[in-house]
Image (cartoon, grey):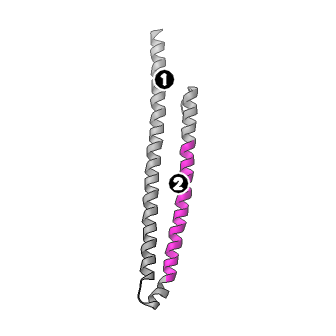
Amino acid sequence: MTDSISAERSLETNAVFTFWDEVKLLQDTYMKMWAMFMSWFTWFYNINLLALSWVLTSNSHDLRSQLVIPFVMLMEFCIAGGAIATVTMFVYRANVERRVGCASACWSSGATAP
């Protein structure tokens, strides 16, 4: 009888640690992804500002007309990359939220997480 009680407590303790370990892992990876997203966004935003200020403050009118098309292409590339990164981050956030909800439901029902 004592062995079955201790085994049951051991399973409950492992389930709790497994649940919180999984939530902690999801939180850590989410925060790492968010930090990478923000640093990427900040980097390309600053590149856009630097390129814009360089084109607009150049003294030569010919240089301005030659740099407009490459500048617009750079801006389009950075904006498209930002849109892709934003959608990717949104999908990742939804997956993390779903996974935590699944782990929470599995833990509260006494089952192990898939």
Image: 82 above or below 53:
above
One can see residue 111 in this view: no
Graded by Cα atoms within 10 Å as few (under 14), some (14 to 19) or many (20 or more), the crowding at tag 2 reads some
Q: Which picture quadrant has residue 36?
A: bottom left
Instruction: Give, as a three-letter code, the residue at label 1.
Output: Glu
**Residue 89 - label:** 2
Per the rendering, the mark at residue 63 is none
Percent position of residue 79, x then y: 53, 68
Q: Is-magenta flag for residue 65?
A: no
- Disc nearer the start of the sequence (1/2): 1
Q: Residue at x 49, y 28 (%)?
A: 15
**Which residues are drawn in magenta?**
68-97
Give amino acid for label 2: Met
Picture residue at 54% right of the left edge, 49% below the top:
93
User: In this view of the protein, which residue sits in the foreground, 98 or 55?
Assistant: 55
Question: In the picture shown, does residue 89 fall above or below 28?
Answer: below
Q: Is residue 6 visible?
A: yes
Real-space Cα distance between discs 1 and 2?
Answer: 34 Å
